[in-house]
Structures are given as structure tokens and as C-alpha cells.
């Protein structure tokens, strides 16, 4: 597959002309080169720990994140979050036959609504190492539904989160989180009036962003719209296996569940993808953008694979879903 990186990415990534190298090898002496020599391996490892377990699990080079943070590539520009009065939420567990274990979940209602209301539903999928309690970055599901975007409240819609494990939301032997979502979680939410007879959208961050895309690709007749924030997308099975051996059980599973390969099935499904310009999954997201049907929204604001970026992209992502769920 051709290199999907846009022109000028080599200096940011440290590869090729303009990247990190010995003095005078290629290009000018940049601030990044000075930082690279001065920080050293120990400093890079320290900062890698602050980035979080997901980046380490994905095989991201810690020194790259160090340089991005020092030279401002990870800075995020976003307006302060504003909320209305959050609606209620309930959490519980159910026995999942698809996952062969008990899983936790949270149902949340928007301001002014509660159990018994018939509402559109957002299925929010968590990232690697997460669960139903932290699927939304920097806030609770009820707070997310109470966000005010550009001074206006979101359209009334509910949200459900659930424990999906660390298997990238695709089927593994004895554990099928995608089947759990479709066959067990959605009927559970529907019994509370959420998504039953009303449209359903998918949303997620990082691993959950990939999962949301996969859910929409597998079930385009079920999912009305999808929003993925910093989706964790690899371009080859070898790349995925090297970075995270548990992401796919086999090469055949990667082929069957590759979000890029099956992006064409999203024709007619509104799609929004936001990924930081310095996100380590940038190549995968660019490959996805090329494969998505015309009309998909893909944006690359300044930022990295960080909590600050995830939180900043939640309001526009939810506004996008709300517009399509209530149209």
C-alpha cells in the first residue's frame, strides 16, 4: 500500500528528509533535533508513561510523543465546555452470552428526560483499557448529553455504554463484543424506550472509534450515523500484531474486520472522523478517508492521541450525531 502520509509529514514523524538525524545530514538544525539530542531515552520513557497505556500498547515510539509535546504539536484549541443540567443515568450488569461473562453498562438520558422516554440512542464504545464507566472522555455520559455546543443544547438523545474488553470490538474465540452490542445491549436499552422505534448512532474513541466504524459497517441498516474520535486503525495485520497481539485473533480476522477494507459499506451512512494531525494512527485514518464513500467528514485538527484531544472533539461529534438522529 502506498504511503498515505500527506506531504510534509516526514519532519513531524522523524522519517526521511527533514526528520531527526545527525547534524548536517539533511535539512536545517531544527528545534526538534535539539530536543531529540537533549531529552535522551530516559526522558522519552518518562513522558511515554504519562501518555497512557494505550499508546504503549499500540507500539507508539515514546520519543515521538515527547517531541510532539515539547514543540506544541499536541496542543489543543477548544472552547471551555458548557453544560446544562444533566439528566439521570443508571448503571448495572447483565450476563452476556456473546462474551460469556457479566458486563457492566450505563444508560443515560438527556436533560428533561428519564426512564420511559422514547429517544434516539448513541452507543458509545470505550477505548483500550476502558470500560462502561469511562467511555466518554473527561465527563460522564449524562454530562455529555447535557453539553451545549455553540451556545445551543444538543438535541434530545440518550446514550448507552458497556464493557467490551480489550479485543478491539471484533470477535475473538469465546468473546464477541460486537454481537453483545447488537443482540444483547440494544434490546436491553430498547426495553427502556431507547433506540426502540427510534434511530441509533455509534460513537467511540480510539479503539472504540474503530469499533464504532466496524459496527456501522457491519450493520448499516441499524446505525443511522457514526462518529469516530482518533480511531485506532492499522493498515496491515502485521502492523496490528506487532503493536497489539490481542487486537485480532488471526490474519483472516483482520481482513474480515478491517475498517478500511469495508468502508464502502458506509455509503448512505453519515460519517464524522476526527483525528489529531500528530496522532500515531494518522496513516491508518488517511487510508480510511480514501476508502470512505463521498460525503464523509474527516478532519485533522492540531493534536495527538490524548485526553485533551478526545474531550475537545466530543461536542462537535455529538452535535453531528444529534443532527442526523433527529433530522
Image (cartoon, helix red, strand yellow):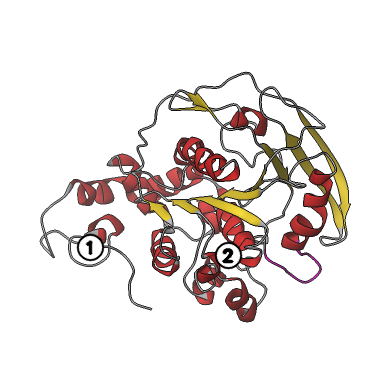
- Residue 69 x, y percent position in the rendering: 35, 42
> Does residue 246 show up magenta in the picture?
no
Q: Residue at x 77, y 27 (%)?
A: 114
> Does residue 172 show up magenta in the picture?
yes
Q: Label 2: which residue?
A: 244
Comparing 98 with 66, the one in front is: 98
Seen in the image, is 184 located left or right of residue 53? right
Q: Quadrant of the C terminus?
A: top right
Q: Quadrant of the N terminus?
A: bottom left
- Which element type, helix, strand or loop, lies under badge 2? loop
Q: Residue at x 35, y 33 (%)?
A: 77
Q: Residue at x 36, y 53 (%)?
A: 64
Bin the neighbour count of mark 1 within 10 Å (Cα to Cα): few under 14, some 14-19, many 20 and up. Answer: few
Q: CA distance from mark 2 to mark 1?
A: 28 Å
| 263 relative to 113, above or below | below
**Is tag 2's residue or tag 1's residue first in the polypeptide sequence?**
1
Answer whether residue 279 is visible to the viewer in this image: no
Q: Main secondary structure of the magenta part?
A: loop
- Residue 198 x, y percent position in the rendering: 71, 45
Seen in the image, is 117 located left or right of residue 57? right
Q: Label 1: which residue?
A: 7
Name the image quarter holding residue 140: top right
Read off the magenta span: 170-176
Comparing 309 with 196, the one in front is: 196
- Residue 109 x, y percent position in the rendering: 71, 31
- Residue 154 x, y percent position in the rendering: 55, 31
Seen in the image, is 162 located left or right of residue 116? left
Q: Are marks 2 and 1 in contact (CB under 8 Å)?
A: no
Mark 2 or 1: the one toward you: 1
Q: Residue at x 48, y 44 (%)?
A: 51
Q: Residue furthest top?
A: 85
Amino acid at each position: 500500500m502506498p504511503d498515505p502520509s500527506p506531504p510534509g509529514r516526514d519532519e513531524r514523524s522523524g522519517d526521511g528528509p527533514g526528520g531527526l538525524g545527525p547534524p548536517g545530514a539533511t535539512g536545517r538544525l531544527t528545534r526538534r533535533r535539539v530536543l531529540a539530542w537533549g531529552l535522551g531515552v530516559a526522558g522519552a520513557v518518562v513522558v511515554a508513561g504519562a501518555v497512557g497505556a494505550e499508546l504503549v500498547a499500540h507500539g507508539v515510539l515514546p520519543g515521538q510523543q515527547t517531541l510532539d509535546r515539547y514543540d506544541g504539536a499536541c496542543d489543543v484549541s477548544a472552547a471551555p465546555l458548557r453544560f446544562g443540567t444533566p439528566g439521570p443515568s443508571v448503571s448495572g450488569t447483565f450476563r452476556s452470552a456473546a462474551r460469556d461473562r457479566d458486563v457492566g453498562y450505563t444508560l443515560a438520558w438527556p436533560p428533561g428526560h428519564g426512564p420511559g422516554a422514547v429517544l434516539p440512542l448513541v452507543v458509545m464504545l470505550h477505548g483500550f483499557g476502558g470500560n462502561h464507566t469511562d467511555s466518554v472522555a473527561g465527563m460522564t455520559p449524562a454530562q455529555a448529553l447535557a453539553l451545549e455546543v455553540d451556545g445551543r443544547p444538543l438535541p434530545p438523545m440518550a446514550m448507552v455504554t458497556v464493557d467490551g474488553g480489550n479485543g478491539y470490538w471484533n470477535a475473538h474465540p469465546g468473546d464477541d463484543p460486537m454481537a453483545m452490542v447488537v443482540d444483547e445491549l440494544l434490546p436491553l436499552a430498547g426495553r427502556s424506550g431507547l433506540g426502540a422505534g427510534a434511530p441509533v448512532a455509534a460513537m467511540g474513541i480510539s479503539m472504540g472509534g474503530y469499533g464504532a466504524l466496524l459496527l456501522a459497517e457491519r450493520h448499516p441498516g441499524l446505525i443511522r450515523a457514526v462518529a469516530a474520535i482518533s480511531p485506532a486503525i492499522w493498515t496491515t495485520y502485521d502492523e496490528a500484531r506487532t503493536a497489539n497481539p490481542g487486537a485480532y485473533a488471526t490474519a483472516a480476522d483482520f481482513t474480515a474486520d478491517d475498517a478500511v477494507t469495508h468502508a464502502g459499506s458506509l455509503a448512505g451512512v453519515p460519517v464524522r472522523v476526527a483525528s489529531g494531525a500528530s496522532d500515531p494512527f494518522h496513516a491508518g485514518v488517511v487510508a480510511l478517508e480514501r476508502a470512505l464513500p463521498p460525503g464523509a467528514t474527516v478532519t485533522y485538527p492540531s493534536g495527538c492521541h490524548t485526553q485533551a484531544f478526545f474531550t475537545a472533539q466530543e461536542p462537535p461529534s455529538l452535535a453531528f450525531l444529534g443532527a442526523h438522529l433527529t433530522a
